[in-house]
Image (tube, rainbow, N blue to C red):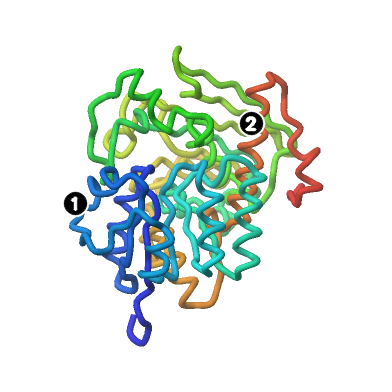
Amino acid sequence: MAGHAPHRVAVVGFAHMHAGDQITQVLRHPATELVGVWDTDPARRDAVCDDLGVPAEVRHTDLDRLLEVAAPDLAIVCSTTGEHTELVERLAARAVHAILEKPFALSLAEADRMIAASDAAGTLLAVNWPLAWYPAHFTTQRLIAEGTVGRVTEVHYYDGNRGPLMHAHGKSVLQAPDLATKQASWWYSPEFGGGSLLDYLGYGATLATWFRDGELPEWVSALTWGSEGLAVDEQAVVTASYATGLSTFQTKWGTFSDPWTVQPAPACGFVVVGAEGTITSRDFAPAVHVQTTAHPEPVAVPVDEARPDQTGALAHVIACLQDGTRPTGPSSAETSRKGQQIVDTAAASAASGRVGELLGSLLADGGVRR
């Protein structure tokens, strides 16, 4: 933007396939400059950077060297989820704002460490949930905020893809991995944040919290399933009990097709039920379908055109930095933290075989009960 020096942005870590997508966002944004990229594995880093034409002189294998030489004011973290906390703390110590590629954290405790480090440094902390930038879903949020369907009473979510090793940046298709390849990948390691529950429940729980204006459930119950030989789940079914009724969140690695090519069955996305109507919001759909008490037959509502700050977490955070505001919606640490609370309780329920009493601990932890 005129009158503003470009924001200096680094991409930190290439374990997540979205690193290349984030680099593309930086290169295209009119108010950002890519000043550095880092990974401990130069081959993994260079495979993406060569494809995108990233100059060799901004590539690093020493993070401290990158931070010293490139002096970024914002970093996009695309490491394993298990490395998020350490990296955010290192960035905050140098007063660097951070965007985390989803999932947020391994646990609520680690999320709180990142929030505390960012707050102490006075830096912004945001989480990139790509579903939040799908026009169908931010159109749904607008309709909810306008009172189209009344108070939200239920949110039903189903989402996933054919598997995290089936595509690279730009959604380019990869050969289906064998069991040994999966076992060697961080996506299938509990230590580093693998599993469909952590990967995709974070989306559903965080956006559902957004749709419900911050409301959290009282109880959560979860079952998971995974193929023999894997240490993590590939499917999860989660039930959340709110004062108004039950909501469901389902995650799946191994959908029939990827929703960005052909919607699988079940379709990926959300159904929001309100006291006065419903909204069906499918990933990548050109319209959402609305029922109301005044018009029970579903009506197709074309999706909203994205504002400049709705095209991705980078654009959202840059707008915040320029306006002196903080991230809002699913990208905010506050809403993402509530999503993490649901994820943690679901994981505990799945591990124990018992229903998780979410608000028994969450009320004392800052959760909202309405």
Instruction: Name which residue type carries label 1.
Output: Asp
Instruction: Report the residue at 28% width, 45% height from top.
Output: 169
Instruction: Report the residue at 23% width, 39% height from top.
Output: 172
* Residue 247 visible, this angle: yes
Relative to 358, 261 lies left or right: left
Relative to 67, 59 lies left or right: left
Instruction: Report the residue at 44% width, 64% height from top.
Output: 316
Query: Against 301, is 306 above or below?
Result: below
Crowd tier of the residue under label 1, counting other residues whose Cα lies within 10 Å: few below 14, some 14–19, many 20 or above: few
Instruction: Name which residue type carries label 2.
Output: Ala
Q: Position of residue 218 (x, y in %)?
A: 75, 37
The disc, 2 or 1, on the residue closer to the chain's N-terminal end is 1
Q: Position of residue 151 (x, y in %)?
A: 65, 49
Q: Nearer the viewer, residue 221 or 296?
A: 221
Crowd tier of the residue under label 2, counting other residues whose Cα lies within 10 Å: few below 14, some 14–19, many 20 or above: many
How far, Cα to Cα, is label 2 from label 1?
Answer: 40 Å
Residue receiving disc 1: 50
Residue receiving disc 2: 346
Query: Against 31, is 20 above or below?
Result: above
Q: Position of residue 112 (x, y in %)?
A: 66, 51
Quarter of the image with the N terminus in it: bottom left
Point out the frontmost of discs 2 and 1: 1
Farthest-out residue, bottom: 3
Relative to 2, 321 lies left or right: right
Relative to 260, 222 lies left or right: right
Q: Residue 25: which quarter of the image? A: bottom left
